[in-house]
Image (cartoon, rainbow, N blue to C red):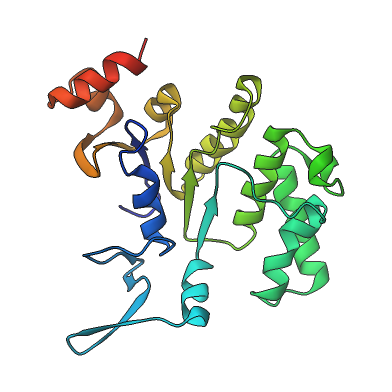
């Protein structure tokens, strides 16, 4: 991927999309091959001809440069939206309370729910919780954002408010990998769409090319079922 590129991973359930995404930040350990982010090998350091797995502290430092948003929000239920957002910047980046709070306020405004800054997750809708999760990931100023089906746990009416935030990030040039079943969103936002099946990349290309003139029969069969 290039800096500033948005890549959407599509394909049937169980095709390996989420596994590939989780390999990027070493939540899943690849059996073979290497992942490099901004020129750095993720999860390992190279000593001569040998790969040495990183310790938890060094791996955490690498992960801090990669924001990840999961399907099920994963907010701390006993913390307000503000507290969820400032926790990592204060502990990991050593920001002052004032700096972390200012960043939280800025990001909550950016995702459109500034008025919910001091609300607990149980008082937020699913779409609002997911937007807090996005703000929390952005608070670390990541080099790349990873989205694992960020709208799959939402009611249909809440999907668009979350997709609008991701679309805004794409417009701002954030480097993003998005696992999604929202085909219209993928066609509108992605610079490149990657179709996966049975753990392999079947084909990839610009959205218009892949959706209107796919070269592989498996891609055509999948798209015929998901694009009305």
Observer-nearest of 39 and 71: 71
Q: Position of residue 30 (x, y in %)?
A: 29, 63
From what the image shows, is residue 106 above or below residue 100? above
Question: The C terminus lies in which quarter of the figure?
Answer: top left
Task: Judge whether 48 appears above or below 223 on screen.
Answer: below
Q: Is residue 180 left or right of residue 48?
A: right
Count of numbered marks: 0
- Residue drawn at x 39%, y 60% is 28
Does residue 48 sit above or below 175 in this rendering? Answer: below
Q: Residue furthest bottom?
A: 48
Identify which residue is drawn at 38% across, 73% down. Answer: 43
Percent coordinates x, y for residue 37 in the rendering? 36, 65
Residue that appears at 53% across and 61% down = 142
Foreground residue among 167 and 21: 21
- Relative to 61, is 188 on the left or the right? left
Residue occupying the point 32% across, 53% down: 2
Q: Is residue 181 left or right of residue 115?
A: left
Res. 207 image quadrant: top left
Q: Position of residue 103 (x, y in %)?
A: 73, 59
Q: Position of residue 4 (x, y in %)?
A: 40, 50
Q: Quadrant of residue 113?
A: top right
Q: Is residue 192 left or right of residue 6?
A: left
Quarter holding residue 38: bottom left
Q: 173 or 39: which is nearer to us? A: 39
């Amino acid at each position: 991927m290039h800096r500033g590129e948005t890549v959407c991973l599509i394909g049937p359930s169980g095709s390996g999309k989420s596994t590939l995404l989780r390999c990027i930040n070493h939540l899943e350990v690849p059996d073979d091959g290497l992942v490099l982010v901004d020129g750095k090998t993720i999860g390992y350091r190279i000593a001569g001809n040998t790969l040495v797995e990183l310790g938890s502290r060094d791996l955490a430092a690498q992960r801090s440069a990669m924001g990840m948003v999961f399907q099920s929000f994963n907010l701390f239920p006993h913390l307000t939206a503000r507290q969820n957002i400032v926790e990592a910047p204060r502990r990991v980046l050593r920001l002052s309370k004032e700096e972390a709070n200012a960043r939280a306020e800025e990001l909550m405004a950016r995702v459109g729910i500034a008025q919910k800054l001091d609300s607990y997750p149980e008082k937020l809708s699913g779409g609002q919780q997911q937007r807090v999760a996005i703000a929390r990931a952005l608070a670390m100023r990541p080099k790349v954002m990873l989205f694992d089906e960020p709208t799959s746990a939402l009611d249909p009416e809440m999907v668009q408010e979350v997709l609008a935030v991701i679309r805004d990030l794409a417009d701002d040039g954030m480097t993003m990998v998005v696992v999604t079943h929202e085909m219209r969103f993928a066609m509108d936002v992605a610079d490149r769409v990657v179709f996966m099946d049975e753990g392999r990349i079947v084909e990839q290309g610009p959205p218009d090319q892949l959706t209107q003139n796919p070269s592989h029969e498996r891609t055509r069969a999948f798209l015929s079922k998901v694009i009305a």
